[in-house]
Every structure is written in structure tokens, then in C-alpha cells.
């Protein structure tokens, strides 16, 4: 069973091959488009993950930028889907609580900034120059880390960038990569 901790970071994507009835056609098309744009702009030219979020409890509660910024359960929402879970080495329970509080306080219940998605495909570097706006899913992860002083940037961060950070940066450790099991570990 995966040992989740508050403050853990998750990258995932929808895979119709693994679970044909779970993602809608819209989710599948959106994931495909995001992967193509990320791969085009990514340093290594590879992009597997299309969504990022943070874990807020050991039981698997999450806080995510979906159609609105909200909580859900990783086991029910992503069971059977590919995930990469990482942890910042300096994350503490106090920092995780602060990050969660700041995210919910600032964005909880608000609508997702879908208007930013085409910019990620066309010119993600432009996002660094725009005035601060609501973050997309992966930006929200780094926004939270920046607020608790574990990161120095958040604008234009993509799920592929988050995955690369988990896999390659010294400040992160990989907790799990594979297919998300249910709560019982199956």
C-alpha cells in the first residue's frame, strides 16, 4: 500500500486503455492535447502526465484545480489510472498544513482558469510575463510550494515539469509510480 503524506505531489493522466469507462471523451481528448503541447515544449520531448495536485491527508484527500478548485479522494478519482507521487524532502506536517490552508483560502470553490490552457500550447514562456492570475493544476502545486518557501517559482509550470522535478531534482523523492490502487491496495 502507498504511504501518503500531506504535502505529497501527484501527477496523473487519463488512460482509456486502462479503464475505458472512467474518462469521458472530453477528458481523453484534453489529456491528449495537453500531452502533445507539453512534449513539444518540454526539454526531454516527453510528456506522460496531464494533471497535478497535492495530497492533503494520509487517507488520500486531495486539493485540485479541476473545473473548480476543490477536494476529492485520490483512490476513488484515480483508481486504475497511471500516477507518479513525489515528496519534497523538506516538507513537514506544519508546512503541508500551511500550504493546504493557503490554497483553500485563496482559491477554494473558484472556477478553473481554462483560458490559460491554449497559452500553454502556444507559448508557455509568455505565462511568466503575465500578471499573476489563478493557477492551472500544476501551477497550483508549485504556487503552494512557493508560499511555504520550498520553491521559487510557479508560473508556466506544467504537469510534465512537475513529473521531471519529482524524478530528477535533488529536493524531491519519488514515493510511487504505477497504476493507482484502491484504498485496500488492490
Image (spheres, rainbow, N blue to C red):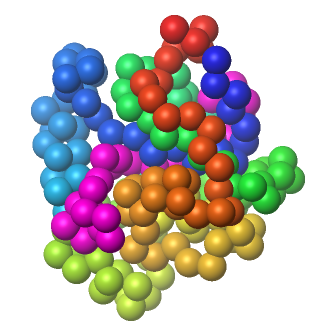
Side (left or right) of 118 relative to 22: left
Answer whether residue 114 is visible to the viewer in this image: yes
Q: Identify the image quadrant of the N terminus.
A: top right
Region in magenta? 38-60
Which image quadrant for residue 146? Answer: bottom right
Answer whether residue 69 is visible to the viewer in this image: no
Q: Position of residue 30 (x, y in %)?
A: 19, 47
At a point 37% along the width and 27% down the height, the residue shown is 81
Side (left or right) of 177 relative to 12: right
Residue 26 belongs to the span the image colors magenta: no
Count of marks placed on residues: 0
Q: Position of residue 75 (x, y in %)?
A: 52, 22
Q: Position of residue 144 (x, y in %)?
A: 63, 63
At a point 33% along the width and 39% down the height, the residue shown is 13
Which image quadrant for residue 152? Answer: bottom right
Above or below, 139 relative to 112: below
Above or below, 21 relative to 155: above
Foreground of the two, 69 or 186:
186
Which image quadrant for residue 170? Answer: bottom right
Assign the magenta stretch its main secondary structure.
loop
Side (left or right) of 170 relative to 142: right
Above or below, 101 relative to 72: below
Amino acid at each position: 500500500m502507498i504511504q501518503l503524506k500531506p504535502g505529497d505531489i501527484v501527477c496523473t493522466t487519463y488512460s482509456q486503455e486502462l479503464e475505458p469507462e472512467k474518462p469521458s471523451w472530453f477528458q481523453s481528448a484534453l489529456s491528449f492535447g495537453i500531452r502533445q503541447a507539453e512534449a513539444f515544449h518540454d526539454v526531454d520531448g516527453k510528456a506522460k502526465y496531464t494533471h497535478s495536485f497535492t495530497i492533503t491527508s494520509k487517507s488520500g484527500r486531495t486539493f485540485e484545480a479541476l473545473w473548480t478548485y476543490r477536494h476529492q479522494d485520490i483512490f476513488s478519482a484515480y483508481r486504475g489510472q497511471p500516477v507518479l507521487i513525489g515528496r519534497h524532502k523538506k516538507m513537514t506536517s506544519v508546512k503541508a498544513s500551511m500550504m493546504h490552508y493557503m490554497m483553500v483560502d485563496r482559491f477554494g470553490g473558484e472556477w478553473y482558469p481554462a483560458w490559460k490552457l491554449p497559452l500553454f500550447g502556444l507559448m508557455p514562456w509568455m505565462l511568466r510575463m503575465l500578471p499573476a492570475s489563478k493557477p492551472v493544476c500544476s501551477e497550483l502545486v508549485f504556487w503552494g510550494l512557493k508560499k511555504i518557501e520550498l520553491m521559487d517559482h510557479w508560473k508556466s509550470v506544467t504537469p510534465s515539469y512537475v513529473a521531471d522535478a519529482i524524478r530528477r531534482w535533488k529536493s524531491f523523492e519519488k514515493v510511487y509510480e504505477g497504476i493507482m490502487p484502491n484504498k485496500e491496495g488492490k
